[in-house]
Amino acid sequence: MDAFRDFDGHIVTWLNQGIGQFYVLDRITYLLVSDYFIPIIMCFWGLSLWFHGKDLVERIGNQKAVLASAISLGFANLAVLLINQAVYRDRPFAQYELSNLLYAPTDSSFPANPAALAFAFATAIWWRNRRASAVPFALAALWSFARVYNGLFFPSDVAVGALIGIAMGTLISWGLRAIEPLPTRVIQGARLLYLA
């Protein structure tokens, strides 16, 4: 187990050497690692998907995908919170001499909450609209990589977070299909309020 932890740490320290080498790369990384930039893009992606569709059937399918992704975010966050109560792991910057472009979080690095949330969002969309999920998956991967590069998470934290997100996105998507017509009725109700 120690060899795995050393390998995990070696990857972070090797990647982190790039910080401070190129100003433009640091500025791009600062955007990608931020708590707001990628989540806001994902929110706008979900909002645009909510109102997109060449016909009513496609639009309702997209709305079910967005509904599933929103619920998946909540359950992925809950899963990470419960694991954090049982397992605490110091952040990489607390264990190694690393550069950090962001603030220094004090919560557990295991599992990576951003990875869980982003992959839950992307996976729930994937189950309804594979083409529309490409951008969220790319954003999830970029956000996760930027956080490892910045020394906020170990690669294993991100991998477990991504697995939690994928599992939650899948379970919620399947669960909503199992309780049809309830999701359809929720969307119909939103349409009556001019929200869909």
Image: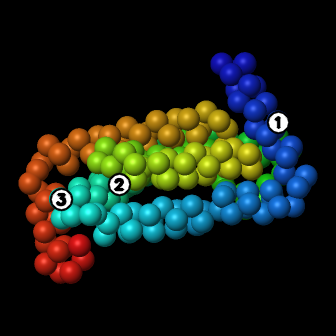
Name which residue lies at 48% across and 61% down: 42
The reply to whether residue 72 is in sight is no
Which amino acid type is marked by label 3? Answer: Val
State the separation of the CA atoms marked 1 and 3. 49 Å
Q: Is residue 123 left or right of residue 148?
A: left
User: Which comes sooner in the sequence, label 1 or label 3?
Assistant: 1
Identify the residue shown where x is 67% and y is 49%: 147
Residue 137 % position (x, y):
49, 47
Quadrant showing the N terminus: top right
The single residue placed furthest to the bottom in the displayed view is 194
The tag on residue 57 is: 3
**Mark 2 and mark 3: span between their CA atoms?**
19 Å
Q: In which quarter of the image is residue 82?
A: top left
- Residue 13 sits in quarter: top right
Whether residues under marks 2 and 1 lie with C-beta atoms below 8 angstroms apart, the answer is: no
From the viewer's perspective, is residue 78 above or below residue 6?
A: below
Give the quadrant of the C terminus.
bottom left
| Image coordinates for residue 178, horizontal then vertical, percent | 14, 43
Where is 125 relative to 111, above or below?
Answer: below
Is residue 119 rendered to the left or right of residue 195? Answer: right
Mark 1 sits on what residue? 14
* Amino acid at dot 2: Ser
Nearer mark to the viewer, of 1 and 3 = 3
Which residue in the structure is indicated by mark 2? 69
